[in-house]
Amino acid sequence: MLTGPNVILVLKVAVASVTVLLLASFVALWRGNYRLHGRINLVFFALTAATLAGFEGLIRVLRPELFDYIDQNDEIRQALNIHLCFAVPSALLMPVMLYTGLTRRRALHLRLAYLFGALWTGTFLTGVFFLPHTP
Ligand code: HEM
């Protein structure tokens, strides 16, 4: 039951679900409701950070062998490396987005928003379409 491909599948569903929240926060922004945008993204941040922490705990501490099969397959390893080029910077940028949003540094928040949007799109596409969730 707890296999590497199953963990990937759960993560794909999680990423797709929080992406719905991110899109909802854009709709709020487009309608001029900055407060709602901030509230939704607070939830987006909390859920994504909690999932990431649980995932890292699982594959680094509890069950480090789960992803051994990835290191044994060059093609999947390469796909994961490409995915991480997007996923790691977007995870690092998330608290910065939260901080610049909450402290109303609008110019910086907006400039970083383009970068975050591109990185999140890359994370989503490479995660959902490059990484195999079947054994
Ligand atoms: C990626 C595209 C994004 C755009 C275009 C965007 C745009 C904006 C704008 C225009 C504001 C209003 C700033 C002001 O009042 O001066 C705002 C506020 C805010 N944003 Fe974003 N944002 C984006 C992503 C994010 C993300 C990813 C997060 C969190 C992880 C976030 C968190 C916030 C918060 C907490 C506020 C404060 C809301 C409030 O005033 O109550 N934003 N954003």
Image (cartoon, grey):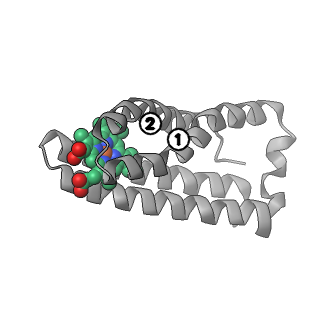
- Residue 119: give x, y in percent of width and height: 50, 33
In the rendered view, does 97 fall on the left or right side of 102?
right
Query: Is residue 20 in view?
Result: no
Side of 56 relative to 43 (left or right): right
Relative image position of residue 56 (x, y in whole percent): 68, 60
Q: How many marks?
A: 2
Hey, what amino acid is under mark 2?
Phe
Q: Secondary structure at mark 2?
A: helix
- Ligand 1 closer than 8 Å to label 1 CB: no
In the image, the residue with mark 2 has its CB under 8 Å from the nearest atom of ligand 1: yes
**131 or 81: nearer the viewer:** 81
Mark closer to the chain start, 2 or 1: 1
Q: Residue 88's quadrant in the figure?
A: top right
View extreme (left): residue:
31
Cβ atoms at labels 2 and 1 below 8 Å apart: yes
How would you rate the neighbour count of disc 1 (Cα within 10 Å): few for under 14, some for 14-19, many for 20 or more?
Answer: many
| Quadrant position of residue 83 | top right
To which residue does mark 1 refer?
Answer: 90
Instruction: Residue 101: give its label.
Output: none
Amino acid type assigned to the residue bearing label 1 in the image: Ser
The residue that appears at 57% across and 34% down in the rendered structure is: 126
Residue 87 location in percent, x, y? 58, 41
Q: Position of residue 95 (x, y in %)?
A: 47, 52
What label does residue 116 carry, if any?
2
Q: Nearer the viewer, residue 46 or 51?
A: 46
